[in-house]
Image: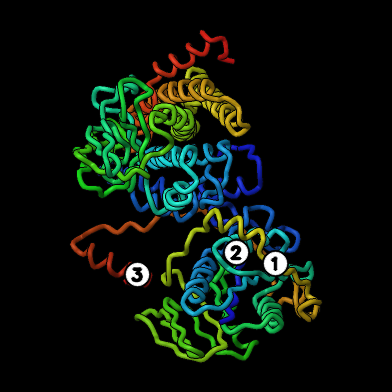
Amino acid sequence: MNIVVCVKQVPDTATERKLRSDDKTLDRDAADGVVNELDEYAVEEALRLKEAHGGEVTVLSMGPAKATETIRKALAMGADKAVHLSDDALRGSDALSTSYALAETLKKIGFDLVILGSESTDARTGVLAAMLAERLGTPQLTLANKVEVDGSAIAIQRVTDYGYDKVEASLPAVVSVVEKINEPRYPSFKGIMAAKKKPVETLAIGDAEISADQVGLASAWSEVVDFAAAPPRAAGTVVKDEGDGGVKAAEFLASKKFV
Amino acid sequence: MSVDRILPTPEAHDLLDLVRELAAKEIAPRAAADEAAGRFPRDLFTLLGSSGILGLPYAEEYGGAGQPYEVYLQVIEELAGAWLAVGLGVSVHTLSCFPVSAYGGAAQRAELLPSLIGGELLGAYCLSEPQSGSDAAALATRAETDADGYLVDGVKAWITHGGVADFYTLMARTSGEGARGVSCFHVPAGLDGLSFGVPERKMGMRSSPTAQVRFDGVRLPPESLIGSPGQGFRIALAALDGGRLGIAACAVGVAQAAFDVASAYARERRQFGSRLVDFQGLGFMLADMATSIAAARALYLEAARLRDAGRSYGTRAAMAKLYATDMCMKVTTDAVQVLGGYGYVEDFPVERHMREAKVLQIVEGTNQIQRLVISRAVARGNAQ
């Protein structure tokens, strides 16, 4: 099975993240780049499927040169090879144009199964899996906390507010995963050393036949008009217990969908 | 805050990154609770093993990582800073593998080393006895030669991982008195006649079992012997030269961890309208702490580089062990002082660091023995 895992380098959520004042895109130099956390679960799931069914795991990442750090991490975990889509023309791409660029690249490199994290910790649109499936003309199986492959059949458990849906399709397909699906492995030191020797193919947009006029900041369907720093956390709501504290606490939790 | 390290290769930086991630995410968060409960974190050694960290200085052909001591020791330092029981445990394990690696025959190395350093197994090192500590050459455990190999009787004391290890590297007497009558053996756990005392109730490192290892008619096949008969004491001392550097690295790690807490506290805590660090009395104390940590790190790294270059390094290793562990005792004690009452309670880790520091002045040669080693080198005129 030919599995492609899409991984994204995002600014470390533990550091202060900023937007650039000039074009209001993410300031990638302001924070350390790390692997988008959910993508580590995607890599782990791909490795487990490979271990169970054989095949090959390819890492696909779109991002600036610095994203090679993220690619190396995925290779160190055990992926076999990587494709790095990197081009200045891609800077500022929104979700729609990102899905277009990734879809064109996926068509070029081929796949039986595409796995990605259900959202990134920076943009958090959570729509890429659906967009990719639509552009590739494949089934989309999103928000999976369990994936099973049997020959060309694939089934997932899709997490919902009320439990899970069982979704079945046939390969090729696009799957997005949530963090409940597995426990990502740490790369071993040997894995880190081996990763340096694994092939990483770097593609510019021309190599993947991506049209420059459909990607980048200028082609984005959405525009960041203005932004402001998040206000400091306000004081919490104080509920005085007048015999109904339990009810009020339960109402609060229900209003936030915790119960 | 991570220490800025000069490392010899890019892969060593990657290794340290991996170790820092494991330390921060998997090791440090469990230290306080497992220490309080006296729970040995065997699973963390399994994780370190699968990450390739239990055989760092050993040859790649046997499954090691072929890393110089300079790198291996900085890994130990990071692990010990997160949790001494883990950092010292890896150091003891590495020490236990040394005799087979350095003195084992080709067949013995090929058969034993891959499993010893491959990550699944955990080792222990059996030299001390109840009545034979600093005077290690007076050890009384006997390995009598007979038709089938060796028959071992005796008691080993203060054995780190006693009862939880998968193999025991044993020094036992095969002939007359003194250092020349000692031989070295590889003893897998689970043999008939091998039993363990109740783990000692220690001041610190309570999660790491320290126990007597008792040999009561334990049968060892002839191929258990490492090196030649009578070579055991020399093997033990050579192993300890490396082991002392491991302890020095542990001491720097614990001191750095205590300093990180104390200095952060001193920058935040305000009294009389000022940050603690801005009071010269405390600022100077912290300056001395930072300086002595940096000096100890430089000293153990210099000894490690001598070793890596194939030079004689035993005296320098003794200096590093002596200086780093005395430094660690002082720095952790001062860290408790910086935090005042908060330093003395378990809500902050510095009281644990202080309890951990004490054992480092004792193990793998007390600091008095280190001074003896160094002063003998001075007497010979080659203390450098």
Q: Nearer the viewer, residue B309 or A91?
A: B309
For disc 2, the chain is A
Q: Tell which tag, 3 or 1, sits nearer the viewer.
A: 1
Report which residue position mark 1 lands on.
A200
Can the viewer see residue B232?
yes
B17 shown above or below B132: below
Amino acid on which the number 1 mark rests in the picture: Val
The C terminus of chain A lies in which quarter of the figure?
bottom left
- Residue at left 52%, top 45%? B56
Indicate the quadrant where residue B351 lies. Answer: top left
User: Residue A210 versus residue A161: which sits nearer the camera?
Assistant: A210
- Give the CA separation, mark 2 to mark 1: 9 Å
Give the image location of residue A226, x and y in percent: 67, 65
Q: Position of residue B305 (x, y in %)?
A: 61, 31
Outermost residue to the front:
B147
Distance from disc 3 to disc 1, alpha carbons, whole Å, reads 43 Å
Q: Amino acid at mark 2?
A: Leu
Q: In the rendered structure, are the residues bearing label 3 and label 1 in contact, judged by CB atoms less than 8 Å apart?
A: no
Classify A44 as above or below B311. below
**SS under mark 3:** loop
Q: How is the image coloured?
A: rainbow
Mark 1 surroundings within 10 Å by alpha-carbon count, few (fewer than 14), some (14 through 19), many (20 or more): many
